[in-house]
Amino acid sequence: MSNRQPEDAAVGLKKSQFFVSRLTPSQPGALGIVGLYGAKACPTLKAYFHAFKGTSIESLAIGRIAVGQWHHEFLTGREGVRSLEREGGQPQESQECVVLVRTGEDSWEIHSHGGRAVVHSFLEIFVASGADEVSWNTWHARLQKDRRDTTIRKQLAQVDGSYAAQILTRQLAGSFQKDIRRIKQTLDTTPRCMDQIVVAKAVIDRLERASRIGLRLAQPWRVILLGPVNAGKSSLINALVGYDRSIVSPHAGTTRDVLETRAVIDGWSVNFIDTAGFHIVDNQKQEINGIEQKGIDRAAVEALNADLILHVQSLDPSAVDGFSTAQLGDALPPYISVGTKLDLCSNKQLSEQPLSEPMVPTSARTGQGIERLIQVVLEKLVPEIKHQPDCFLEGVPVSREDIDVVRKLHQQVDAYSRDL
Ligand SMILES: Nc1nc2c(ncn2[C@@H]2O[C@H](COP(=O)(O)OP(=O)(O)O)[C@@H](O)[C@H]2O)c(=O)[nH]1
Ligand SMILES: [Mg+2]
């Protein structure tokens, strides 16, 4: 007989491995979850957990839960005393109501309220009992059979917009795989007919349209503001995000470098990038200095990598616009022309403005036009929301691998259509 350690066949983990991980964020939250893996997990849990119904946790079926009390007598033990002493307290007994979930033969989750101390004490106990504490990333990489699941969880931890989180949660629940199964079933049905091919093509088309957004859910959109010094760029960002972040000054050249401000607008995460103004000489008619030139150069580089440019120009009749996006070359991202300081401009002056393109008039001072600008920005960044709302409600490819799967099915469907 081989003397190899018995393995959990599904994940290739050795039963002798014993590790613990905090599966919820380290900040206090409504719920705290700690994962525990290894043959030593069950005996360790038994020492602290008492199910309300008296159920023995060894007999708990995989996927089932047990609700019970977690007895904190351990706090009088060596590790517990250390942790209490550190916080200047006295050893004491306490009990927590927890839910224990058996997620696999040797894997468990403890769900409790999300206070920092309780989660911390779970971790301390298991580490004192010999478990290695691993990051949630390592936990999922070791326990998930499905690499895609791990990729989506990693992305979910990075998103801060609710729209992206909704899309990713649907993918975690299997929406993409469901679509793929549907396409494959349609293609496997015999005899093949054009109606089935049309259904499969419609699903493939939807997945392909959704992939543009799916591939960058974890990254915010990058919106850069360009325009002359004093056009009101920094004030506009402050008005867009709702608090003072950019340095606003009546003196030219205050924003020396690029400054990013993250905001979530209508559920989408957007980085607004404030830049030094573009000008040839500053207000005192002196050559721009080296630091300022650096800022301008960096802005030009950032502009080429942005998803959207806001070309900001003052509507104040006394302002002169010395900047054109043409200064940055041809290969530019899409842009929106934004007029600022609407409050300084009469309706008559506005109607007389020599505009070469549609412009969104705004005032950071009064808030006029800011809501409209937000809508125009989102429509430019994510036109699918308005024009193809079906795109994100079901499967969405979220990685290059997903896109390859869809591409292969597309080729297969094309081949079938030709054969029919
Ligand atoms: N009246 C008025 N003044 C504004 C408005 N937006 C900006 N300003 C003023 O214009 C000046 C330059 O603004 P700033 O945001 O620093 O311009 P930037 O150089 O393009 O970043 C400051 O004195 C602002 O207070 C606005 O909507 N109305
Ligand atoms: Mg500025």
Image (tube, rainbow, N blue to C red):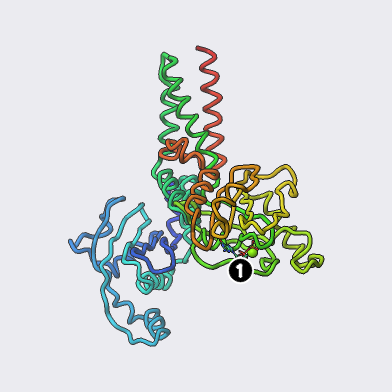
List x then y, in percent, for residue 251. 68, 69
The answer to whether residue 258 is left or right of residue 376 is right
Res. 67 visible in picture: yes
Ligand 1, image quadrant it occupies: bottom right
Res. 142 visible in picture: no
Residue closest to the eye, 121 or 201: 201
Residue closest to the eye, 174 or 106: 174
Amino acid, disc 1: Ile
Tell whether circle 1 marks a residue whose Cβ is less than 8 angstroms from ligand 2.
yes
Residue closest to the eye, 145 or 300: 300
When the figure is inspected, residue 114 is found, relative to residue 190, above or below; the finding is below
The answer to whether residue 371 is left or right of residue 281 is left
List x then y, in percent, for residue 66. 25, 58
Q: Residues within 10 Å of mark 1 (few under 14, many from 20)?
A: some
What residue lies at 38% left-to-right and 59% top-to-bottom? 39
Q: Which residue is mark 1?
A: 247
List x then y, in percent, for residue 288. 79, 65
The answer to whether residue 142 is left or right of residue 308 is left
When the figure is inspected, residue 150 is found, relative to residue 175, above or below; the finding is below
When the figure is inspected, residue 196 is found, relative to residue 396, above or below; the finding is above
What residue lies at 57% left-to-right and 40% top-to-bottom? 400
List x then y, in percent, for residue 143. 44, 52
Residue closest to the eye, 141 or 326: 326
- Corner quadrant of residue 256: bottom right
